[in-house]
């Protein structure tokens, strides 16, 4: 099932929760909506589920306008953040509730319940009440209940946020497996970028109710289009600079400690424009000899302090007023001396030029 | 090291002493003033001077007046519960699901009738609905009817009682239901919605099963209270009700022993209804799993919804206050006779309240008795709650359960028991009823105090106390400086409720206070009401003064406790 948001807006009084959202979720994809808390992602999910009316715009299921269809007729399966298991019904009763509403024959209900319980590995817990289950088991009941009705779209609202780290890893694999097996179009809301990067076929990042960028995990990580996005996914250095000139598709940017050539330029800039550069800490390479300050994409800074983590050593270089440049060294051999000047270089394709934007702390 | 050991040993001894001391004091009080009197009733019901007998029961059930009295009271109890459910269900849904302007103040006003003495309302109702009462006179003057309507004919009196009881007791159900609804995570319903369940199905399959324990807990209180309320039928003039019969039988109990059988029957009824409701509720209290974001728990009422909400809420408040408004008008009317409303208004009856002995003494007595019983409740309640929540002794839960028994035990039974048990002893109520009155008031309201103190203490985690002790503070110091300040709000609220209900008490006051100078306010109102002349007006004025005191206390309590207030009325 293909899901399309067309110019969708949601306002609560004077507060805009979602503003002019345009989004296409391809059939069979595992689509993530990623963003910091309060960015409007849960609201978007609830709009899709039909639990909240939209203020303007349209939602289409396979081209059919479902904007005014009530939740109960959209055929969605939903997993709430807190699971929303009915505490007075046992596992089986929870799962078969939706099937009974569909007035299926009792043999069909039986088959589907055992099928989903097998898929979610719940068969042993059939007669338990939710209160008697662990967090991970509850999560699986919620998933099974949503899957049993063979939904057109599966909606997951931060389904793993109430689990501990170990269980979260396990459930991630579980969810990926179930998606592979069922091929149900899945819409997953989270603030955890690791979940999104590891499971998603596509990711939409949202901020302040606005879509920031949609793409595959790799696109979003390697080529973010805004400072917010670069900062939000993975760790990066945001360095302020002034645009010097364009050379072909590349741009030259002067910062306070080096001049950079960047082959990923987002936006058109002219000389003197303020820009941000994003360079991941892992993209720097140490040079064997000192370098002259005039050479592009090389720099030499005084080491502030370092943290040794085995396979990685995190170096921190203070520059300007209270600013820090972070560099990760892979498989460091010898210890670098604090206070010494260390030369580095970075490739133009690892330097991303972005329109200037204050970084939110 | 050894210092620490000694210290921890003294702490342990201290807490054990406090624990067992509390349990002994409570047990003694409950034994002598709850269990023993009820035991006496039971034994007297089955023992004649010649030995075991069922003769009193045979006499009771052969007596037509008595059996109709029982049926009438059962009808009052069931009718009140039924109509109170009808009134409170929609209100509770509104309160749990919708936000609208003025919700806070309207919710508080909805609770007001709970402390409005229904038997005082009966005075006003009589005045307005009598054959030549205000309503009929108004209708006659406007030629809407040509003959006065018999609103309060003998057949209708029972409905007048039910009407007053419903308007007095619906807040208990409303509180229980709305806190039960508010406790249900909205996503539970939304989930059913996404699966295709209609609104009705969602209520039937999800909301109602989860709210049922709360409903039954409240319903049984409403049922028992209306079944055994003495004041309302007495003042409405509906004399063929079980509590009124008991009231009449107390005085000549030595000549007519069927009183024992009747009171025993009441005990049997309430206990079995109480246990049945427990059976319905027990083991069905579902632990709500972790709650997610609660947006959508209550939403802004739409314009259309407000068309239903405001009339419903205002309508209920208005209806519930009708009896009290009629009392207000009665208390202010100057030589009011044969007109729809008084032609002149006066404050002279309020002046007379303070001039006449009965009313002035009644007011003073009630304030003193209620204060004393509230202090007793505060001390016992805090100790019991502390011992139970801090698990100082094994079987604390049992203590908690025993303390709740008075909620289900009708005041009329207790008062009856006191009279037959303590007549001709140093506690003889004929001689001086103050100790028994204070104890009766205190025991019957102790559950509220324990409930609110427990609720407060459960929120104060014991690690806060341990933190204080880690800095070298003694147990006593910690209790004084850390624990008590954190639960003050709960204690004030619980105390206000105890106080209000003590002032409202009818059955204990009417039965135990036998001489003028010991009359509490409720008995003073009753006696004044029976007087000819200005008695009815002074009684109304006195009733108004009581209502003002109670209104202030209940608004204070609900402001402090908010939604948690419902939990005080659970058995």
Image: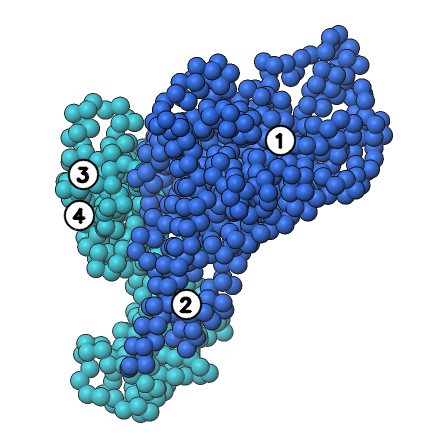
Chain colours: A cyan, B blue
Q: Nearer the viewer, mark 4 or mark 3?
A: 3
In primary-sequence order, the first of circles 1 and 2 is: 1
* Residue B32 position within the rendered picture, expressed as x and y whole percent measured from the top left: 43, 46
Q: Given the current orientation, which residue lies at the most extreme right position? A: B344
Is residue A222 rendered to the left or right of residue A41? Answer: left
Query: Residue, x 31% and y 72% (percent of image)?
Result: B9
Alpha-carbon span between mark 1 and mark 3: 55 Å
- Circle 3 residues within 10 Å: few <14, some 14–19, many ≥20: some
The total number of labels drawn is 4
State whether residue B117 appears in this view: yes
* Residue B200 position within the rendered picture, expressed as x and y whole percent measured from the top left: 40, 27
**Residue behind mark 1:** B119
In this orientation, which residue lies closer to the viewer: A25 or B22?
B22
Query: Residue, x 27% and y 91% (percent of image)?
Result: A337
* Residue A174 position within the rendered picture, expressed as x and y whole percent measured from the top left: 19, 49
**Residue behind mark 4:** A177
A342 over B168 or under it: above or below: below
Q: Secondary structure at mark 1?
A: helix
Q: Secondary structure at mark 4?
A: helix
Alpha-carbon span between mark 1 and mark 2: 46 Å
**Residue behind mark 2:** B465
State whether residue B500 appears in this view: no
Q: Are marks 4 and 3 on the same chain?
A: yes
**Residue behind mark 3:** A126
Q: Nearer the viewer, mark 1 or mark 3?
A: 1
Alpha-carbon span between mark 4 and mark 2: 49 Å
In this orientation, which residue lies closer to the viewer: A97 or B396?
B396
């Amino acid at each position: 099932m293909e899901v399309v948001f067309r110019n969708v807006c949601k306002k609560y009084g004077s507060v805009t929760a979602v503003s002019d959202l345009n989004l296409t979720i391809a059939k069979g994809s595992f689509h993530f909506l990623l963003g910091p808390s309060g960015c409007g992602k849960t609201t978007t999910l609830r709009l899709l589920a039909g639990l909240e009316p939209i203020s303007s715009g349209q939602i289409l299921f396979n081209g059919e306008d479902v904007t005014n269809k009530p939740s109960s007729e959209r055929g969605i399966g939903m997993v709430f953040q807190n699971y929303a298991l009915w505490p007075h019904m046992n596992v089986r009763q929870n799962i078969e509730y939706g099937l009974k509403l569909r007035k299926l024959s009792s043999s069909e209900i039986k088959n589907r319940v055992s099928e989903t319980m097998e898929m979610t590995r719940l068969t042993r817990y059939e007669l338990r009440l939710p209160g008697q289950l662990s967090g991970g088991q509850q999560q699986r009941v919620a998933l099974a209940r949503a899957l049993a009705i063979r939904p057109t779209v599966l909606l997951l609202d931060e389904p793993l946020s109430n689990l501990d780290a170990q269980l979260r890893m396990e459930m991630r694999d579980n969810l990926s497996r179930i998606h592979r097996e069922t091929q149900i179009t899945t819409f997953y809301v989270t603030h955890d970028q690791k979940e999104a990067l590891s499971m998603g076929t596509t990711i939409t990042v949202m901020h302040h109710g606005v879509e920031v960028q949609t793409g595959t995990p790799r696109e979003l990580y390697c080529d973010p289009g805004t400072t917010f996005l670069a900062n939000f996914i993975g760790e990066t250095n945001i360095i302020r600079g002034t645009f010097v000139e364009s050379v072909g598709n590349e741009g030259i940017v002067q910062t306070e400690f080096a001049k950079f050539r960047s082959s990923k330029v987002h936006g058109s800039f002219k000389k003197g424009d303020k820009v941000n550069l994003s360079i991941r800490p892992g993209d720097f390479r140490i040079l064997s000899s000192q370098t002259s300050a005039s050479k592009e994409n090389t720099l030499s800074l005084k080491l502030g302090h370092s943290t040794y983590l085995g396979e990685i050593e995190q170096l921190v270089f203070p520059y300007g007023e209270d600013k820090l440049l972070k560099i990760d060294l892979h498989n460091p051999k010898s210890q670098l001396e604090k206070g010494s000047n260390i030369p580095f270089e970075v490739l133009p394709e690892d330097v991303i030029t972005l329109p200037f934007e204050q970084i939110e702390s | 090291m050894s210092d620490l050991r000694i210290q921890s040993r003294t702490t342990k001894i201290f807490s054990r002493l406090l624990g067992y001391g509390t349990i002994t004091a409570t047990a003694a009080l409950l034994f002598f003033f709850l269990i023993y009197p009820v035991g006496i009733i039971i034994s007297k019901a089955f023992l004649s001077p010649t030995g075991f007998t069922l003769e009193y029961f045979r006499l009771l059930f052969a007596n037509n007046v008595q059996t109709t009295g029982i049926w009438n009271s059962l009808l009052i109890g069931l009718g009140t519960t039924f109509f109170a459910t009808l009134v409170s269900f929609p209100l509770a849904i509104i309160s749990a699901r919708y936000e609208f302007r003025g919700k806070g103040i309207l919710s508080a006003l909805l609770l007001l009738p709970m402390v409005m003495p229904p038997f005082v309302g009966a005075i006003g109702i009589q005045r307005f609905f009598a054959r030549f009462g205000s309503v009929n006179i108004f209708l006659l003057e406007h030629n809407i009817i040509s003959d006065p309507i018999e609103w309060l004919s003998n057949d209708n009196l029972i409905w007048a009682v039910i009407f007053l009881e419903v308007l007095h007791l619906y807040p208990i159900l409303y509180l229980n239901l709305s806190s039960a609804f508010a406790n249900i995570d909205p996503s539970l319903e939304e989930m059913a919605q996404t699966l295709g369940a209609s609104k009705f199905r969602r209520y039937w399959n999800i909301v109602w099963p989860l709210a049922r324990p709360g409903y039954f807990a409240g319903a049984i209180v409403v049922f028992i209270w209306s079944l055994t309320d003495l004041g309302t039928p007495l003042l409405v003039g509906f004399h063929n009700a079980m509590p009124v019969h008991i009231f009449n039988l107390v005085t000549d109990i030595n000549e007519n022993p069927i009183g024992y059988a009747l009171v025993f029957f009441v005990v049997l009824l309430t206990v079995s209804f109480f246990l049945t409701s427990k059976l319905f509720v027990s083991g069905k209290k579902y632990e709500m799993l972790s709650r997610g974001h609660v947006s959508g728990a209550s939403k802004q009422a739409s314009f259309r919804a407000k068309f239903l909400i405001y009339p419903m809420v205002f309508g209920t408040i208005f209806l519930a206050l009708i009896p009290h408004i009629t009392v207000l008008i009665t208390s202010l009317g100057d030589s009011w006779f044969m007109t729809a409303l008084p032609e002149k208004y006066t404050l002279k009856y309020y002046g007379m309240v303070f001039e006449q002995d009965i009313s002035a003494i009644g007011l003073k007595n009630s304030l003193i008795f209620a204060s004393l019983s509230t202090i007793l409740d505060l001390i016992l309640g805090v100790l019991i709650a502390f011992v139970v929540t801090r698990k100082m002794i094994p079987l604390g839960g049992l203590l908690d359960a025993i303390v709740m028994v008075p909620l289900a035990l009708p005041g009329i039974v207790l008062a009856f028991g006191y009279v037959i048990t303590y007549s001709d002893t140093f506690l003889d109520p004929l001689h001086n009823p103050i100790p028994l009155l204070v104890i009766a008031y205190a025991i019957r309201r102790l559950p509220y105090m324990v409930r609110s103190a427990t609720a407060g203490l459960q929120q104060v985690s014991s690690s806060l106390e341990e933190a204080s002790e880690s800095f070298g503070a003694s147990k006593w110091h910690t209790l004084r400086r850390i624990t008590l300040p954190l639960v003050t709000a709960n204690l004030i609220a619980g105390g206000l409720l105890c106080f209000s209900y003590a002032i409202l008490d009818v059955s204990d006051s009417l039965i135990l206070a036998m001489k003028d100078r010991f009359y509490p306010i409720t008995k003073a109102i009753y006696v004044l009401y029976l007087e000819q002349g200005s008695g009815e007006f002074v009684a109304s004025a006195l009733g108004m003064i009581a209502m003002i005191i109670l209104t202030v206390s209940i608004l204070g309590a609900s402001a402090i406790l908010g939604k948690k207030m419902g939990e005080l009325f659970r058995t």
